[in-house]
Amino acid sequence: MAWSERRFSIGFGSLLFVVCGWTTWTSYQSTVGAPTPVALVASGWMALGATAFVIAGRRDRLRVGDRRLEWWRIQGLGFVCLGAAVLTPAASGMDAWLDPISSGLLAGAFGIYGALRLRYEPSADDSFEPSVRGLLRVLIQSVITVLAVRAVPF
């Protein structure tokens, strides 16, 4: 794995840990007593995904029993866990930050991409050296897309 991929994986995993902690804290503050079980399950899925991204950034391979997981498979597990974290509130009918249709589409996208990462090794010919400008462009486009989806009534 290239050094830029390692930094991206560790940074994304760390960001997910912050988001996980923030959502759990706000869920705890908005309810009287303890957070709802659905919020805890969604936070657990997000924490597992964050852990997978950090592990993928720190290690090239990991041995689990008699199986050897390469870094791209660990990242694939992280994406699948993110899909489950997005789908959990929508499947339970809990009010989430996205409507159920958008949540289902986003969860499906994370799940399918994660499944493909689990199955296929990335090509060594593909050079993945993202520039700061490219990453900012993707981030801004993602925010605009989420805001546009939220603005359209379904």
Image (cartoon, helix red, strand yellow):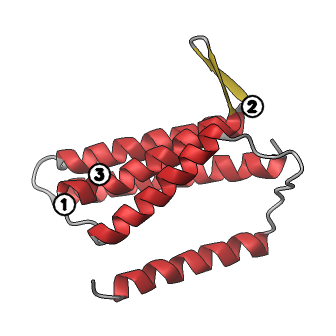
Q: Residue 83, can we see it? A: yes
Q: Hey, what amino acid is under mark 1?
A: Met
Q: Which residue is painted at 82% across and 46% down in the image? A: 123
Q: Hey, what amino acid is under mark 3?
A: Thr
What is the spatial separation of the Cα atoms under label 3 and label 2, in whole angstroms?
Answer: 30 Å
Q: Hey, what amino acid is under mark 2?
A: Asp
Q: Does dot 2 land on a helix, a strand or a loop?
A: loop
> Most extreme residue toward the right, as rendered?
125
Q: Which residue is mark 1?
A: 94
Relative placement, left or right, of 95 versus 62 is left
Q: Does dot 3 land on a helix, a strand or a loop?
A: helix
Q: Does dot 1 land on a helix, a strand or a loop?
A: loop
Of the numbered discs 1 and 2, the one sitting upstream in the chain is 2
Compared to residue 59, the image places residue 95 above or below, namely below
Q: Which residue is painted at 35% across and 65% down in the image? A: 103
Q: Are marks 3 and 2 in contact (CB under 8 Å)?
A: no
Q: Residue 16, can we see it? A: no
Relative placement, left or right, of 11 versus 96 is right
Q: Which residue is painted at 40% across and 81% down in the image? A: 149
Q: Which residue is mark 2?
A: 60
Of the numbered discs 1 and 3, the one sitting upstream in the chain is 3
The location of residue 99, given as percent across then percent down, is: 28, 72
The location of residue 23, given as percent across then percent down, is: 34, 57
Say which quadrant the C terminus sits in. Answer: bottom left
Of the numbered discs 3 and 2, the one sitting upstream in the chain is 2
What is the spatial separation of the Cα atoms under label 1 and label 3, in whole angstroms?
Answer: 9 Å
What is the spatial separation of the Cα atoms under label 1 and label 2, in whole angstroms?
Answer: 38 Å
Compared to residue 79, the image places residue 55 above or below, namely above
Q: Residues within 10 Å of mark 2 (few under 14, many from 20)?
A: some
Q: Which residue is painted at 65% across and 73% down in the image? A: 138
The location of residue 110, given as percent across then percent down, is: 50, 55
